[in-house]
Image (spheres, coloured by chain):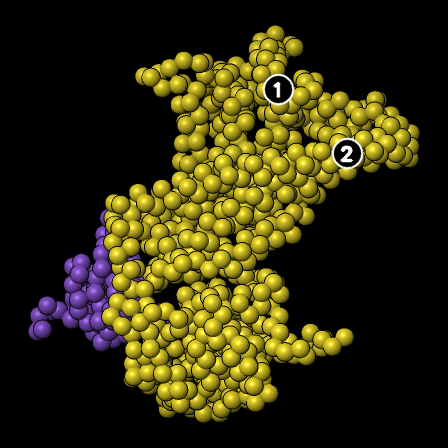
Chain colours: A purple, B yellow
């Protein structure tokens, strides 16, 4: 803790963190309806070959695929 | 009749998230008593069915498209909100379906629907999954609604659910109090409008304040009043939506965490992870995907061939039988060459459609499709397509009809439309006979670097079609405007075995919708084509008026004197710069029934009785000379020009019919026809002028 906040696209595969807040309100609305809320645990599962699609696991319960620009709006706890 | 008229029948709505197993339950509850229609303005399937509750009670069941909340972000998603706010026919009961293993994230919309003021039952689906323990009573107590554990797949609990439906229809459990506690501003605004907003519950009024701009049932006067009031009060819709969502979650999350116990890695999560390691691998995953696509291609291409031949030969025999028993005449011709041919043209697509949707259905059901879409999202999005478009493009290699029908699952309208527009560029199986008969005139036999020259040329033609599709997609992406923002944000569900019943209904439904939806157009066009090819104004048909309508034996004019022949000759000046003569003109016109008709037309033109005698057709074509110049007609230049024409041109009435059905207007098939045919003309023109 204490270090600068990061966004979810900066996670490394298999790294886990927690969501602090969302930058884009529209995306936030959609993510929240899908069960992705502030304080949720977020783990990066993998990136695709081009690094443009990112797969996350939320609360160890379900997986979701996000575009890189979508993931960048999710602010997570720093290192 | 004991069954009451439709207007009095009660309406039960099945609602829930995508992947909640809602459709499986719908199929379980309605069986064959289901119908698929469309919602106005969008091409989302509207599935309704009859639910028999007891000997004397049946209700209408509506399977609402899966949604996450009452705040839609695309036109298609708005259907769910419209169903409740706009429709005059209000549901008598809502059965909310939720996947028990994902309960925490599937309950948001339940609380919203309850706040709209409807009686609700919560159906906890997939309770038979290992590693799941649920205390339904705790949920009943908290939400104050009946909770029924079920399995849509095996039918466990479905009887109890029916009994609960019967009970709630006579004893509705809807309440006035809202699960969500309104903010002061939301309370003041909804109370200010009160009965001006024609929806009884406070939450319905609040949703109207959020969505009034696109709600069609509101008058302009009310809309402008809401507009000025909400702006004046600084009502921030998105902010209000987010705090509402957060407030709902904070109420039910602790309850669900207490009531639900999931074993570590249970409910299929562990197996899913293991499969995903391979299937979603950046390299192996792509190879795996293309192997599956190869299988699909092979299946439509090869497995459908047998049934298609069977349909064609059966219909041929039926025609022969009719000709044998009924006296010859124009009515017999109409029945055999027009009607039966048209009918064959419809039925012959059924094997391909059934096989494609069976396979796509499996991929969707087990949860693989979402993964494939996510893998190809970036690549496809750059050219205006969607991950799912790949399935359409690959299947287009066999036939554009099922391929275009498969785009129904692309939720972004623009991406779906572009996929529909470019798929027919991919060389389909109907082009193969044309390529096969022509390629010999353009490319001599022999080998280059060990490869068969003609084979390379054939590959080249396929390649040109693929490039054309991708380039056209990119160009259309720049042209077509879309108001919907594009998102991926896609859940990757747990792998599950497919439910055979669901596959059956999918295949059945798709086949039916093709036959009923596109069949009519195909039939009409084939009758027109038959008329053009069988009748002509010439002297050989100079029967006195009236007599031509008799069933007497009537001499059919040769093809070149028929209307089609005249049309072919009329367009000759237009197609001469492409190196085509009037005979090719006739073939192009007749090809509109289906591209492979080219071969049969050539057989007719050269008076070859057996149109499967390809060698003889080729020999005649090879010897054909221009009567004026005495030069060979099928030179390399003309042949390449014709081949290029067949690669690009929209010459398939069935494709246009299905595009009309899928886009719900004549606008797009017409644009597609003009776009493809102009490109074909231009391409052929350039090729001919360069080579001759």
Seen at 21% across and 65% down, the residue is: A43
Left or right? Give the position of A20 relative to B8. left
In which quarter of the view is residue B589 placed?
A: top right
Tell whether label 1 touches label 2 (CB within 8 Å).
no
Of all residues shown, which one is farthest toward the left? Answer: A2
Q: Which residue is mark 2?
A: B321
- The crowding category of the residue bearing disc 1, from other C-alpha atoms within 10 Å (few below 14, some 14 to 19, many at least 20), is few
Residue B613's tag is: 1
The quarter of the rendered structure image containing the N terminus of chain B is bottom right
- Which callout, 2 or 1, points to the residue nearer the camera? 2
- Earlier sequence position, callout 2 versus callout 1: 2
Identify whether B138 is placed above or below B519: below
List x then y, in percent, for residue B275: 29, 55
Q: What chain does mark 2 sit on? A: B
- The crowding category of the residue bearing disc 2, from other C-alpha atoms within 10 Å (few below 14, some 14 to 19, many at least 20), is few
Asked which secondary structure carries label 1, the reply is loop
Q: What chain does mark 1 sit on? A: B
Seen at 55% across and 33% down, the residue is: B430
Q: CA distance from mark 2 to mark 1?
A: 23 Å
Residue B664's tag is: none
Identify whether B329 is placed above or below B631: below
């Amino acid at each position: 803790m204490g270090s600068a906040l990061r966004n979810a696209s900066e996670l490394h595969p298999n790294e886990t963190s927690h969501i602090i807040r969302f930058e884009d309100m529209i995306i936030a609305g959609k993510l929240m309806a899908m069960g992705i809320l502030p304080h949720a645990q977020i783990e990066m599962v993998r990136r695709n070959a081009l690094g443009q699609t990112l797969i996350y696991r939320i609360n160890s319960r379900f997986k979701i695929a996000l575009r890189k620009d979508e993931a960048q709006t999710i602010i997570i706890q720093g290192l | 009749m004991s069954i009451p008229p439709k207007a009095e029948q009660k309406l039960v709505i099945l609602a829930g998230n995508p992947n909640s197993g809602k459709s499986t339950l719908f199929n379980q509850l309605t069986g064959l008593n289901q119908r698929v229609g469309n919602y106005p303005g969008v091409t989302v399937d509207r599935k309704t069915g009859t639910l028999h509750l007891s000997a004397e009670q049946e209700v209408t069941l509506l399977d609402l498209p899966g949604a996450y909340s009452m705040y839609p972000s695309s036109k298609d998603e708005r259907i769910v909100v419209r169903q409740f706010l706009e429709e005059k026919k209000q549901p008598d009961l809502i059965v909310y379906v939720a996947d028990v293993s994902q309960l925490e994230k599937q309950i948001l919309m339940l609380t919203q629907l309850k706040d709209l003021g409807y009686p609700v039952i919560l159906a906890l689906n997939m309770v038979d999954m290992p590693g799941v323990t649920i205390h339904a009573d705790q949920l009943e107590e908290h939400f104050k609604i009946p909770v029924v554990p079920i399995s849509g797949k095996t039918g466990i609990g479905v009887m109890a659910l029916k009994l609960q439906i019967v009970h709630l229809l006579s004893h509705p459990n809807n309440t006035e109090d809202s699960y969500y506690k309104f903010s002061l501003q939301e309370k003041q605004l909804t109370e200010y409008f009160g009965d001006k907003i024609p929806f009884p519950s406070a939450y319905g009024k609040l949703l109207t304040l959020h969505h009034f701009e696109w709600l069609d049932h509101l008058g302009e006067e009310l809309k402008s009043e809401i507009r000025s009031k909400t702006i004046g009060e600084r009502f921030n819709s998105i902010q209000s939506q987010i705090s509402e969502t957060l407030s709902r979650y904070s109420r039910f999350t602790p309850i669900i965490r207490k009531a639900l116990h999931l074993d570590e890695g249970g409910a299929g999560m562990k197996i899913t992870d293991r499969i995903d390691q391979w299937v979603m691998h950046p390299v192996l995953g792509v190879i795996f995907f293309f192997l599956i696509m190869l299988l699909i291609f092979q299946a439509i291409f090869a497995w459908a061939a047998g049934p298609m031949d069977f349909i064609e030969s059966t219909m041929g025999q039926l025609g022969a039988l009719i000709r044998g028993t009924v006296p010859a005449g124009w009515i017999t011709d109409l029945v055999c060459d027009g009607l039966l041919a048209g009918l064959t043209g419809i039925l012959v697509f059924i094997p391909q459609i059934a096989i494609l949707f069976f396979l796509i259905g499996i991929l969707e059901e087990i949860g693989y499709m979402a993964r494939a879409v996510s893998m190809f999202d970036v690549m496809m999005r750059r050219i205006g397509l969607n991950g799912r478009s790949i399935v359409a493009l690959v299947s287009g290699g066999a036939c554009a009809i099922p391929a275009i029908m498969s785009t129904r699952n692309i939720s972004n309208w623009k991406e779906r439309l572009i996929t529909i527009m470019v798929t027919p560029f991919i060389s389909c199986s109907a082009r193969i006979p044309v390529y096969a008969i022509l390629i010999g005139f353009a490319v001599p036999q022999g080998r280059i670097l060990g490869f068969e020259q003609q084979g390379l040329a054939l590959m080249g033609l396929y390649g040109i079609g693929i490039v054309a599709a991708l380039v056209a997609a990119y160009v259309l992406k720049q042209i077509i405007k879309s108001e919907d923002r594009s998102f991926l944000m896609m859940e990757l569900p747990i792998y599950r075995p497919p439910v055979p019943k669901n596959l059956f209904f999918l295949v059945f439904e798709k086949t039916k919708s093709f036959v009923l939806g596109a069949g009519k157009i195909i039939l009409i066009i084939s009758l027109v084509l038959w008329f053009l090819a069988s009748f002509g104004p010439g002297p050989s048909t100079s029967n006195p008026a009236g007599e031509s309508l008799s069933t007497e034996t009537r001499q059919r004019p040769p093809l070149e004197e028929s209307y089609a022949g005249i049309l072919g000759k009329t367009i000759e000046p237009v197609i001469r710069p492409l190196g085509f003569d009037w005979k090719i003109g006739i073939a192009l016109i007749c090809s509109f029934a289906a591209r492979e008709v080219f071969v049969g037309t050539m057989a007719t033109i050269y008076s070859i009785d057996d149109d499967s005698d390809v060698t003889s057709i080729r020999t005649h074509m090879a010897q054909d000379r221009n009567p004026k110049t005495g030069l060979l007609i099928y030179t390399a230049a003309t042949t390449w020009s014709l081949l290029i024409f067949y690669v690009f041109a929209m010459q398939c009435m069935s494709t246009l019919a299905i595009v009309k059905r899928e886009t719900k207007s004549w606008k797009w098939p017409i644009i597609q026809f003009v776009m493809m045919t102009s490109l074909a003309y231009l391409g052929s023109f350039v090729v001919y002028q360069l080579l001759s």
